[in-house]
Amino acid sequence: MQRHTQGRRLHLIDIENLTGQPRPNRSTVAVWSEIYRQSGLVRAGDLCVLACNHGAAIEAGLGWPNARLLVRSGPDGADNALLDVLTDESVRDRFDEVVIGSGDGIFTEQAAGLAADGLPTTIAHGVGKLSRRLELAASQVVALGTLIPATGIAASRSAA
């Protein structure tokens, strides 16, 4: 099957893992949105999908504008919502690259499968832990935590 995607990237972002908080507030999400965009990972035409639990939905949606927001609660709720995108939405036909904004090992099998299908997969992790297996399955790893400006992280913590 031939892809007609013109270099589009799909960004699957677990905001809870990226921030290291189960219910990040709007300013924390906004800081991470800016860090993510400044990293150079996002290009024109890319699709950003942000996932969180119901308790963080309003703050996440307001803090990361222009992202598709998925909400699912329960154990690994945000992770499972993002995994559903990978399995149910013809990702291999619609995109040329996938960026997973999480370090959770639950994404290892999917990341390895994408790579095996020739779809480069980048892991962009924040302050949450990075699974060693996921790191090995990825085409590339970007440590977003190293891009945090001292003023930005201080502001996001004080607003918490």
Image (cartoon, rainbow, N blue to C red):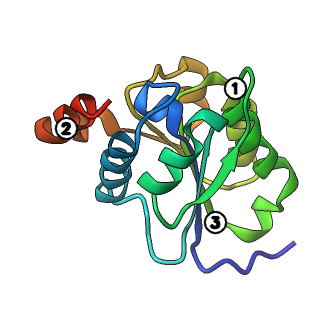
Q: Which quarter of the rendering shows the N terminus?
A: bottom right
Which label is found at residue 48?
none
Front residue (pair 30, 120): 30
* Residue topped by disc 3: 96
Disc 2 marks a residue whose amino acid type is Ala
Q: Position of residue 111 (x, y in %)?
A: 67, 39
Discs 3/1, front: 1
* Residue topped by disc 2: 155
Residue 148's place in the image compared with 58, above or below, is above
Looking at marks 2 and 3 on the same chain, the residue that comes earlier in the sequence is marked by: 3
Discs 2/3, front: 2
Q: Position of residue 16 (x, y in %)?
A: 52, 32
Residue 81's place in the image compared with 22, above or below, is below
Quadrant of residue 108 within the rendered picture: top right
Specify whether residue 108 is in view.
Answer: no
| Disc 3, SS | loop
Residue at figure coordinates x 68%, y 49% from the top left: 70
Residue at figure coordinates x 70%, y 26% from the top left: 106
How far apart in space, not on screen, are marks 2 and 3 (Cα)? 36 Å
How far apart in space, not on screen, are marks 3 and 1 (Cα)? 22 Å
Disc 3 marks a residue whose amino acid type is Asp
* Residue topped by disc 1: 106
| Disc 2, SS | helix
Q: Position of residue 148 (x, y in %)?
A: 22, 39
| Disc 1, SS | helix
Looking at marks 2 and 1 on the same chain, the residue that comes earlier in the sequence is marked by: 1
Disc 1 marks a residue whose amino acid type is Ile
Q: Which quarter of the rendering shows the C terminus?
A: top left
